[in-house]
Image (cartoon, grey):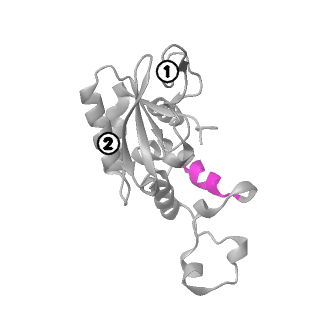
């Protein structure tokens, strides 16, 4: 069964701090909840004329793939003024390469606990809180929204001597961005190219 992985990053290493099952209760649930709340009903071209209950309810943009994907409409909600700050924090936490600094994690935990809907966010908040209490060296938290992707933070930087991976190095790595800092910037401008 798939799961959402959570990672704790120190100055020079990364550790898996826990997971929440099923990954469908993570990013996918967040996307569908926000889609239903803020976007108009979606009916793909192939479904037009089919009728039935599904036609009345609409379909999810999460079911679209490739060049016809409509996921950008959901991710684009990050710049929608109708979303609360907490909803923007939650949505941004589902994007690739995002990290939350431990010194801003209280905002993330609050947003996760405030978010309405059937998700694993409260469980994720508990995992994060326990990890931070247990390891004062943690400086950031990262996510792999679905285990089917493989390990996004822990399988970088192979130590040739020990033949073990030390994980992503927050000091030398360049692919990450910080969640709260980008949300703060977005209050003045749009968040671009993060999804």
Query: Residue 41 placed where, x, y %?
Result: 58, 70
Measuring 35% from the left and 23% from the top, which residue is drawn there? 138
Measure how far apart labels 2 and 1 are at the Cα level. Answer: 21 Å
Image position, residue 9 (x, y; %): 42, 25
Is residue 150 part of the magenta span, yes or no?
Answer: no
Looking at the rendering, the stretch of residues picked out in magenta corresponds to 69-77
Q: Residue at x 31, y 49 (%)?
A: 122
Whether residue 28 is visible to the viewer of this picture, yes or no, is yes
Res. 146 in view: no
Q: Residue 161 in the image: x percent, y percent?
A: 51, 13
Q: Disc 2 vs disc 1: Cβ atoms closer than 8 Å?
A: no
Mark 2 = which residue?
125
Give the vertical position of 189 relative to 38 (above or below).
above
> Mark 2: which secondary structure?
helix
Q: Main secondary structure of the magenta part?
A: helix
Q: Residue tagged by mark 1?
A: 170
User: Going by the picture, which residue comes out furthest to the top?
Assistant: 161
Please state which of residues 2 and 184 is positioned toward the viewer in this rendering.
2
């Amino acid at each position: 069964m798939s799961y959402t992985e959570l990672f704790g990053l120190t100055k020079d290493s990364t550790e898996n701090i826990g997971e929440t099952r099923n990954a469908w209760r993570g990013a996918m649930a967040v996307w569908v909840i926000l889609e239903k709340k803020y976007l108009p009903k979606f009916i793909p071209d192939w479904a037009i004329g089919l009728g039935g209950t599904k036609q009345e309810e609409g379909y999810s943009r999460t079911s679209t793939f490739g060049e016809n994907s409509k996921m950008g409409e959901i991710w684009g909600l990050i710049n929608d003024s109708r979303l609360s700050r907490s909803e923007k924090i939650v949505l941004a936490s589902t994007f690739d390469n995002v990290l939350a600094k431990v010194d801003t994690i209280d905002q993330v935990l609050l947003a996760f606990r405030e978010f309405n809907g059937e998700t694993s966010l409260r469980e994720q908040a508990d995992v994060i809180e326990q990890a931070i209490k247990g390891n004062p060296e943690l400086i950031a938290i990262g996510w792999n929204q679905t285990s089917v992707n493989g390990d996004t933070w822990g399988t970088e930087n192979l130590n040739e001597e020990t033949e073990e991976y030390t994980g992503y190095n927050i000091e030398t790595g360049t692919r990450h961005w910080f969640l709260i800092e980008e949300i703060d910037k977005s209050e003045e401008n749009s968040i671009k190219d993060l999804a």
